[in-house]
Image (cartoon, rainbow, N blue to C red):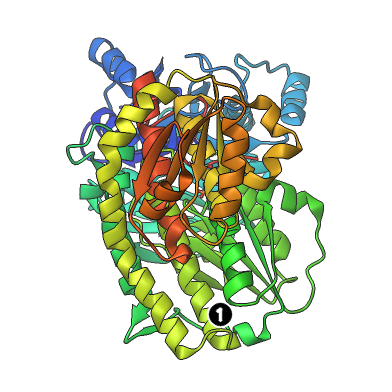
Amino acid sequence: MCGIVGVLGNHEAAPILVEALKRLEYRGYDSAGIATVNHGALDRRRAVGKLVNLSDRLVHEPLAGKAGIGHTRWATHGAATEGNAHPHRAGQVAVVHNGIIENFRELREFLAEQGIGYETDTDTETIALMVQYHLSQGLSPREAAATTIAGLEGAYALCLLFEGEDDLMIAARKGSPLAIGHGKGEVYVGSDAIALAPWTNQITYLDEGDWAILTRNSIDIRDASGQQVQRDMRVVNVDAARIDKGGYKHFMAKEIAEQPTVLTEVLGHYVRDGGISLPGETLDFTKVQRLTMVACGTAFYACYVAKYWFEQIAGLPVEIDVASEFRYREPPITAGTVALFVSQSGETADTLAALRYCKGRADAIVSVVNVRESSIARESDLALPILAGVEVGVASTKAFTNQLMTLALLVLKAAQQRGTLTAEALAARLEALRSLPGLVNTALTIDARCEALAVKLAEARDILFLGRGQMYPLALEGALKLKEISYIHAEAYASGELKHGPIALVDKHVPVIVMAPRDGLFDKTISNMQEVMARGGRVLLVTDKKGAAEAGDGVWETLIMPETDPFLAPILYAVPAQMLAYYTAVAKGTDVDQPRNLAKSVTVE
Ligand code: AGP
């Protein structure tokens, strides 16, 4: 996902912009650039690849000026080249943009009719060309920007800079988040508060359709109709400590290790005096007939695990779907349905669109998010924070386990209200959840084993994951973790499904990772493992001591996990899934924190 920054400051803008962009690296990018205005002169520098390349460029070709904008680009329209890197410029205008302008072809046709051509493959350049066109028609920068913005369709967060204007930026937001930072005689713009944390924690988030005329001493926010509006300024304390690796080789390693701590935090947030307390108007699950859960990627697998829990423990029917399918499937939302959305970033475009489909149809919109000021949180009736802290690694780890912990607590709340759990059974489940951070801490000690196994896994071309029951979604998550950071093809199947075709993939070259605590389905899983081993497949069994004892001979490798209540297994067994993926990626030398082609939050369709 692209990152945007801007500053009207009292110091040289270039170093501030580059530092702010570094804090947005976690979003994934493939080129970067900045533009400044210096005594009225507008200029820019851009570079392909990591920010260090842009910094090199600035050493050799410095850019002066105390007003500037910057951008990290994750290519959507047009390859990752310097020419396609932002800021884009047309005459007196420079622009940085996150999102997709869906009507950029029509705008190009209009420009062509005026004899105005374009230089790049990007939709973003069209924004600059349109503003420049309106300037050429005699409009002021503010009027030219307002007219252009009103004519844009699609999703955008953008910031404009003008030749001759040392104290003006114009920012706008529709679909992609944008924050304004308040400084002392300075003003900042950023895709999120993390980018601006070194300079300010006083943040105003633009609402959907807002645009703002910014000077060092004025912030004039307008809504889509052009009416002046006030938006809250809030203090957003981004824990700067959580923005560095803390001595780990990768953010992902640090975030895997943080799980016991953040699991404890989210438990403490919701469990008080032996009971589960939800914020705001507590949901009344006695009135809920059906739960519809929607998300993407890892967040979807958290929903999938929770489906088993809600149905088995709370007796509540649950429908799940990935957001990109749900939003176009147009499912009937019947009375008594609550729609629940899970999203680490709270900005995933498909999930946000699915939420908006449910608005006015579902009885309530509930979200489980890590970013409390995110669009999904703000558009929910009830937003449940997971308190995982800033997650920088593109591959989600601590957010996944905290999503599961939050969902598990919601399940117990539902069971309590629907009377499907006695007070004693509830207390026992809560006690089990309280034990989880300690169990996860113990599980983290398998890292040396995972590192050794990863060297063998790194040689594989294909890897299968198997799981039964609530461990099946965890197998799906394990396959996603592995493929997204090691680039090895990995797939997950419900263990019982293997013989219906996928077993044809099994031979001695294919490691089969089986996620199977010694639970009520273990015996069935043993049979599936035998089917695999009978065909030369190499089984890596992730289980507990009892499971290992019963698995018998022939297992290629075994990873022993602490004994646990089966209810907790999907959360606990996320640790080996994460570690096997992490160390395999390290063995393969891939970019663990920013894997190729991926972004931390996908705010485009
Ligand atoms: C998970 O490791 C991936 N990075 C990806 O699947 C992610 O879970 C998905 O894009 C959803 O993101 P969200 O939780 O921010 O909505």
- Give x and y (percent) for residue 564: 38, 62
Look at label 1 and name its amino acid: Ala
Q: Position of residue 542 (x, y in %)?
A: 43, 44
Q: What SS does tag 1 mark?
A: helix
Give coordinates of residue 187: x percent, y percent: 32, 48
**Residue 139 visible in the picture:** no
Q: Where 267 falls versus 250 (above or below)?
A: below
Q: Quadrant of residue 222?
A: bottom right
**Residue 384 appears in the figure:** yes
Along the line of sight, which residue is nearer the eye, 6 or 225?
A: 6
Residue most extreme to the left: 247
Q: Residue at x 80, y 60 (%)?
A: 331
The answer to whether 23 is drawn above or below residue 273 in the figure is above
Describe residue 571's horizontal placement relative to residue 185 as left or right.
right
| Residue located 43% across and 56% down the image | 571
Q: Which residue is mark 1?
A: 414
Which quadrant is home to the C terminus? top right
Quadrant of the image occupied by residue 537: top right
Q: Residue furthest front?
A: 553
Residue closer to the observer: 415 or 517: 517
Task: In the displayed orientation, state which residue is furthest to the top.
Answer: 60
Q: Residue at x 43, y 63 (%)?
A: 568
Q: Residues within 10 Å of mark 1 (few under 14, many from 20)?
A: many
Q: Mark 1 vs ligand 1: CB under 8 Å?
A: no
Query: Relative to residue 453, is residue 570 depicted above or below?
Result: below
Residue at 40% in and 49% down? 549
Residue 506 at what x, y percent from top left? Answer: 62, 26
User: Closer to the camera, 330 or 561?
Assistant: 561
How many numbered marks, from 0 up?
1
